[in-house]
Amino acid sequence: MEVFLNQDMLITIMEVIFVAAAAIQLFFYLYFYLQVATYRRKEGKAHTPPVSVIIAARNEYDNLAAHLPSILEQDYPNFEVVVVNDGSWDETEILLEEFQKRYSNLKVVIRPANDYHDAGKKLAITLGIKGAKHERLLFTDADCRPVSRQWIQSMIAEAQGDTLVLGYSPYSKTKGFLNRIIRADAYLTAMNYMGFALAGIPYMGVGRNLSYSKTSFFKIGGFKKHYSIASGDDDLFVNEVANKTNTVVCLEKNGVVESLPEAKWKFFWRQKRRHLYTGRRYKRIHKLLLVLQPISYLMFTASAVVLLVFHKWLYIVIMTLSFRVLLQFFIFRRSSQRLGQTDLLIFIPLLEFFVVMMNGFIHIANAFAKPNKWKN
């Protein structure tokens, strides 16, 4: 008798969890993610203020040789590209000198190798901002390549005053399951920070494709509040500065910047550990929402499996699961077209599970040991 009571209690608990988790999942899809799919840029004359593109690079000879010309040759009326040679000991300096002979809009800021004291990327970016001559700043990395010559124009079109512009930077497509995981993780992350921003709750951006003003940077003292943390030059800065009135998103295909993905699991794991470690410094409301989404997803999935195993609420569970899959498909179909990730669409239900589980394990790892310093 006691066994049956315990089983009945378990089923009742699973039913309550299933309903609550399904409601939370529905809220996230209809309130946040749907906004990405239905977003329309405001019509009007595009702004073309002078722009300083800033790239911090350490030992990035190959990447700069491959990608820097596509940035220097952007179709934009007035811009400079500021490359901070962050203590490189390869042939980066020689390469940049050659590029300066060919491109008058390239400015190089040198941080000597003997000045290196593990200050990380934030110091290099700060030097680049100080060396920039224009008020409007646009950031990317040495391993990034704009998908079009209208990248700057697309990112800056809605930038006015102290506006922050959150762009999208997917990883290049290669073979293998790891590449799908990396690209799906970047896509799902973008759905979060883009959707949150459109809902008036901006919490992060990615430094591979991000724009803000020089005034915004110096007004809060740059990175001083989180200078001791290796990463966070992008998401922690946005988390501190962004609000519902000063933040816009760029969902134009021409505004996308592709980045090179990690080729091995161990390097991707390290990278994700650094990125997720900064999340503990987010504002409370952001941390609550970011925890609520994956936990509700896991509880929704687990409770559905238990109810199906015990043949309880069979039709309700099957219909709810089917509805979530269809809702995800239709919302992600439109957003993946915007973000150029349509090939991931049919794999998203499976990839989402792997991404959520992976991030969970990384959070556990970060709770026991601090991730390594920024090395790039």
Image (cartoon, helix red, strand yellow):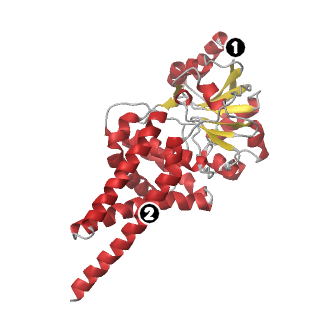
Q: Residue at x 78, y 39 (%)?
A: 215
Residue 81: give its label. none
Q: Quadrant of the C terminus?
A: top right
How busy is the neighbourhood of tag 2: few (under 14 within 10 Å), some, or many (20 plus)? few
Q: Quadrant of the N terminus?
A: bottom left
Residue 127 at x, y percent in the picture:
71, 34
**Residue 20 visible (yes or no):** yes
Q: Which residue is mark 2?
A: 23
Labelled pair 1, 2 in contact (Cβ < 8 Å):
no
SS of the residue under disc 1: loop
Q: Which residue is mark 1?
A: 104
Q: Residue at x 38, y 73 (%)?
A: 16
**Residue 230 visible (yes or no):** no
The correct choice, above or below, for 76 with respect to 136 in the image is: above
Residue 92 at x, y percent in the picture:
58, 22
Q: Earlier in the sequence, mark 1 or mark 2?
A: 2
Give left or right: position of 188 versus 223: left
Of circles 1 and 2, the one toward us is: 2
Residue 264 at x, y percent in the picture:
37, 38
Q: Nearer the viewer, residue 59 or 81?
A: 81
Q: Nearer the viewer, residue 375 or 277?
A: 277
The quadrant in which residue 70 appears is: top right
Give left or right: position of 193 versus 182: right
How busy is the neighbourhood of tag 1: few (under 14 within 10 Å), some, or many (20 plus)? few
What is the three-letter code of the residue carrying label 1?
Ser
Q: CA distance from mark 1 to mark 2?
A: 56 Å
Q: Nearer the viewer, residue 42 or 221?
A: 42
SS of the residue under disc 2: helix
